[in-house]
Amino acid sequence: MIDLVFGRWTTPVLWVLNHHGKLRFTEVQKLLPDCTPKVLTQRLRQLEADGLVTRTYYAEMPPRVEYESTELARTLIPVFNALADWSDQHLAEVLAARAAYQGD
């Protein structure tokens, strides 16, 4: 169940949608350039199935699709904020531990 929120690319996708609001696929992709289109599509579909993302299709020419975090996904904002705070407070320690481990 933990991978529901902390699976690869889940947290970045949810953070982007929570932070930027309703976005088209290409806009999400620009904000997550290291995520391949295939993986982003899979992650968005899974998040939609989990009730964390809403996909809205507009039948116009050309067709348009937008993604938005749901109210359920927005309940994760305090979790993301806590992780960001923890990172701000402890990043130096983590980097020092990595350096020590690598013998730098």
Image (cartoon, helix red, strand yellow):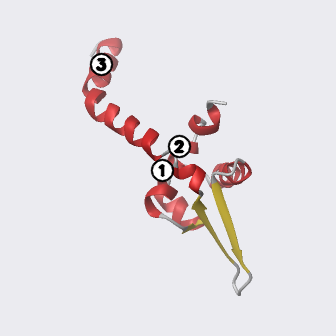
Q: Residue shown at 29%/29% (left/top)?
A: 91
Q: Residue shown at 49%/64% (left/top)?
A: 21
**What x and y, as percent, mark residue 100?**
29, 13
**Is label 1 in a helix, a strand or a loop?**
helix
Q: Residue shown at 60%/57% (left/top)?
A: 70
The residue nearer to you, when weighing 48 against 9, is: 48
Instruction: Using the image, determine if residue 76 lies above or below residue 67.
Output: above
Q: What is the crowding at mark 3: few (fewer than 14 residues within 10 Å), some, or many (at least 20)?
A: few
Q: Residue shown at 51%/58% (left/top)?
A: 17
In the displayed structure image, the side of residue 102 where residue 31 appears, left or right: right
Please say if the residues under marks 3 and 1 sit with CB atoms less than 8 Å apart: no
Residue type at mark 2? Thr
What whole-number distance in Å separates the C-alpha atoms at marks 3 and 1? 29 Å
Which mark, residue 99? 3
Q: What is the crowding at mark 2: few (fewer than 14 residues within 10 Å), some, or many (at least 20)?
A: some
**Is label 3 in a helix, a strand or a loop?**
helix
**Is label 2 in a helix, a strand or a loop?**
helix
User: Which callout, 3 or 1, points to the residue nearer the camera?
Assistant: 1
Please say if the residues under marks 1 and 2 sit with CB atoms less than 8 Å apart: yes
Instruction: Report which quarter residue 104 is drawn in.
Output: top left
**What x and y, as percent, mark residue 38?**
68, 53
What whole-number distance in Å separates the C-alpha atoms at marks 3 and 2? 26 Å
What whole-number distance in Å separates the C-alpha atoms at marks 1 and 2? 6 Å
Residue linked to disc 2: 11
Q: Which callout, 3 or 1, points at the residue further toward the start of the chain?
A: 1
Residue linked to disc 1: 15
Residue type at mark 3? Ala
User: Residue pushed farthest bottom?
Assistant: 61
